[in-house]
Amino acid sequence: MNQNPFELVKTSDRSKARRGRLHTAHGTIETPIFMPVGTLASVKGLSSRDLREMQAQIILANTYHLYLRPGTELVAKMGGVQKFMGWDGPMLTDSGGFQVWSLKDLRHITEEGVEFHSHLDGSRHMFTPESVMKAQREIGADIIMAFDECTPYPSTVEEASQSLDYTLKWTRRAVDWLRENPPVHDYPQYFFGIVQGGMHKELRQKSIDALKEIAPDGYAMGGLSVGEPVETMYEIADFCTNSLPADRARYVMGVGTPWNLLELIKRGVDMFDCILPAKNAQDGLVYTSRGVLRYKNAKFADDNCPLDPECDCHCCKNYTRAYVRHLFKTKEPLGWTLSTLHNLHFYLHLMQQARDHIEAGDFEEYCGTYPATSAGSGIDSRYMSLKIAIISFFSFKK
RNA sequence: GUGGAUGUAGCUCAAUUGGUUAGAGUCCCAGAUUGUGAUUCUGGAUGUUGCCGGUUCGAGUCCGGUCAUCCACC
């Protein structure tokens, strides 16, 4: 569609880990990269200055949410999402396929598109591949996503196949619409297709083959981390990257824990987004160089250490666990801001480490020595859970 | 000093004409969270019902006394 924005810099000899660059009108993104989620044109609790200071390279906004409020036409009128939110770096918009999927009782899916009721006021709306492309053009992100149907887990081959059928038809219609209609903004907006197919490899293969013919500017893998065992997620992602074109960017949507990210980078993934670091920070849990830390726990009430003694983020350099816990307990907005600041810094720093080690040629060793990090979810392997338990026990016992 | 009112979880309050193991919110404690419908959700702990006695098969509830607090009047 457009000129390929992705530049493959290096691939590891001993895994599929890749070092690359994604060139956009608002800047170059060094990959592998994690994209902080800013659903409503805001990474909750943070200003664009915070994002710049933590060296965020690209952030993600959401078409469904911006469509409902303040409206994509208004965003266009304000000069696009970057100008609207005071962030001049690269942006990506998710199409809203996932949101519509999560609306469950409020939606009706047909081949034409998705009819749904706003979760805000119940008003009726229709999303079609065409209308969603129009909305994303108006929002003006550097990367826009196909309108897909996120296949639930578990799903039978028949269900996943039917779902994939819609996603592929919608993707073709989206591309046609983009070709036939003029851009809203005067810079390129790259279009990423989304691989679906549930946990069925033959469907994932079919999805990839069809997408290759459509030739989007990049490839995302959707429908992962929707309840399947983590090993299955790795296996499917691994299967996909075997077939995806090596010269295009690969993006696993909605994943995941720090450990998930390293495992998927090893399997050839370049881009990630996830609400987990932001959501967990907000709920009293942060990631540290020594594992997960539930800073809201009573044992940290008089802990004078930073959240992570080895972290050099603004929060860790200036504030203590006792203080951040106090802010959480008293529901002070600053607590949300500081803990989110830390968690996102942690993720971005992790990606920096990954890039450095891929370049140095020792990424696989780095993964082997990396401290176990649970998301606080039970889907990691038993081995990991044990390791986490041991590390947590010795690290945070007081 | 006299009269009246009120005493139930750390806090704010429920509990039918006396009827199972005295509940709820909040607070506290722990857990969950994977393209944000999320300042969210799930679970747990906490009581000599001010105290002493009486009536009753059975009292947070009725009676007597007592203590505390508040109000009004001397």
Image (cartoon, coloured by chain):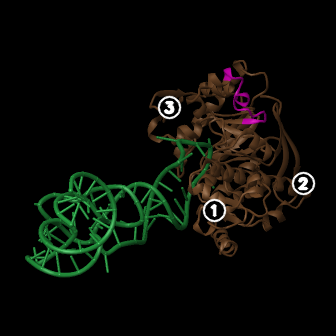
Magenta region includes residue A88? yes
Above or below, A352 against A112 in this view is: below
Residue of label 2: A359
Q: Nearer the viewer, mark 2 or mark 1?
A: 1
Q: Label 2 marks which chain's residue?
A: A
Tell me if residue A67 can be seen: yes
What amino acid is at disc 1?
Tyr
Above or below, A66 against A396 in this view is: above
- The residue shown at (60%, 25%) is A131
Which chain is assigned green? B
Magenta region includes residue A250? no
User: Which span of residues is magenta-colored?
Assistant: A76-91
Residue of label 3: A110
Above or below, A159 against B15 in this view is: above
Residue A395 in percent (x, y) is at 70, 72
Query: Which of the numbered marks, if any, corresponds to residue A295?
Result: 1
- The residue shown at (65%, 25%) is A75
Residue A150 in percent (x, y) is at 58, 42
What amino acid is at disc 3?
Thr
Which chain is assigned brown? A
Q: Earlier in the sequence, mark 1 or mark 3?
A: 3
B11 horizontally vs A51: left or right:
left
Task: Determine contact: label 3, label 2, CB under 8 Å.
Answer: no
Real-space CA distance between mark 2 and mark 1, rounded to the nearest whole angstrom: 34 Å
How crowded pointer 1 is (Cα within 10 Å; few <14, some 14-19, many 20+) is rated as many
Q: Label 3 marks which chain's residue?
A: A
Real-space CA distance between mark 1 and mark 3, rounded to the nearest whole angstrom: 45 Å
Residue A209 in percent (x, y) is at 71, 40
Q: Are marks 2 and 1 on the same chain?
A: yes
